[in-house]
Amino acid sequence: MASIVSYRSTSIQTDRGCEVFSVAFSSDGKKLISGSSDATVYIWNADETRSSFQREQPLIGHESSIFSIAISPDGKHIISASKDDTLRLWDIEKRTQVGGPWEGHTGAVNCVAFSIDGMHVVSGSDDRTIRLWDVKTGKQIGESLTGHQAGIQSIAYVPDGTLVVSGSDDHTIRIWDVERGLQVGVPLEGHTGDVLSIAFSPNGKRILSGSRDMTIRIWDVDTHRQIGPRIPARASVMSICSSPDEKLLFFGTDDNTVWIWDAETGKQMGERLRGHIRAVECVACAPDGKSIVSASLDGTIRIWNIETHVAWSKL
């Protein structure tokens, strides 16, 4: 076991050989949730300053790596997606699994997201399908959504909850009306590599995409057209998110760093955030916009002060 402590004073190694694929803040910023290659979900509790977190006992049930996790809007549940082809729902207060595994996918489940009302979950898989799930029953709703020609790596709900966007190894982005089971419009094309990360601007009007082609692109949700030139990243973009005020973009790359860009000018701000020694698989912004968290294949999670670009803490 390990806890996050001051990055300046002590460096602590988490479980050896463990790769961290996903991390998320709770809506109040008091908890971090992580998923990793040891098939476990961890809950981390913040101290009063929210610059240090203490890890609890793991949530165990999956049989293989956990590639994606999400927290319900009410902060009561976690959904985890795994290489074992299943999803699992967890009760945060009781620290227990809710029901059995959600089964249906026939390939690794790479990405997952809660609907805005918390009643549904959407998932994307290497089986090239997107599936909608009922949180109360753990059962699939309707038919699987098909159209992508390769595995689905990233998925996100539009902030108003009406649409879902997916990114795939087929280099395209697609928009879906999951309630009706229909693709909306034509695929968004332009990337020349796997689309590894998808995120929305907080107002829901723009889609942010990151790719193995080492670019970030911004798209208009209504017109399905790219906005402005591509943003060069000089490394594969594994994860992307925006600040609550939409002024900053954060992305983690396979050159082991986190980048900060001005969303309006498309220019890099300051130096890259360095400290990880392997690819940064996930980045997430705290609800108050004052810090970001990064998770890496090096087995660590780091919390960064956005204003100073200093690592407050390291798992």
Image: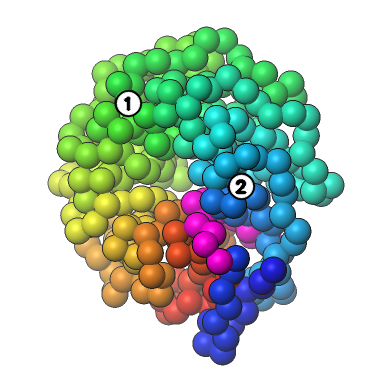
Q: Residue at horizontal 50%, vertical 18%?
A: 178
- Residue 292, compared with residue 42, is above or below; it is below
* Residue 23 within the magenta-colored segment of the rendering: yes
> Furthest residue to the bottom?
9
Quadrant of the rendered image containing residue 72: top right
Give me the disc on residue 260: none
Q: Residue at horizontal 26%, vertical 18%?
A: 186
* Residues at marks 2 and 1, CA–CA distance in whole angstroms: 24 Å
- Depth check: 270 or 223 in front? 270
> Furthest residue to the left?
229
Neighbours of disc 2 within 10 Å: few (<14), some (14-19), many (20+): many
Q: Which residues are magenta?
A: 16-32
Q: Residue at horizontal 33%, vertical 32%?
A: 168
Q: Residue at horizontal 64%, vertical 50%?
A: 40
- Quarter of the image containing the C terminus? bottom right
* Image position of 89 (left or right of 104): right
Kindly identify the amino acid type of the residue bearing the numbered disc 1.
Ala
Any part of residue 129 in sight: yes
- Residue 112, compared with residue 59, is above or below; it is above
Viewer-nearest of discs 2 and 1: 2
Kindly identify the amino acid type of the residue bearing the numbered disc 2.
Ala
* Image position of 256 (left or right of 285): left
Residue 162 is situated, as x and y percent measured from the top left of the image, at: 50, 24
Quickly name the residue at label 1.
150
Quadrant of the rendered image containing residue 86: top right
* Image position of 294 (left or right of 211): right
Q: Does dot 2 land on a helix, a strand or a loop?
A: loop
Any part of residue 72 in sight: no
Quickly name the residue at label 2.
39
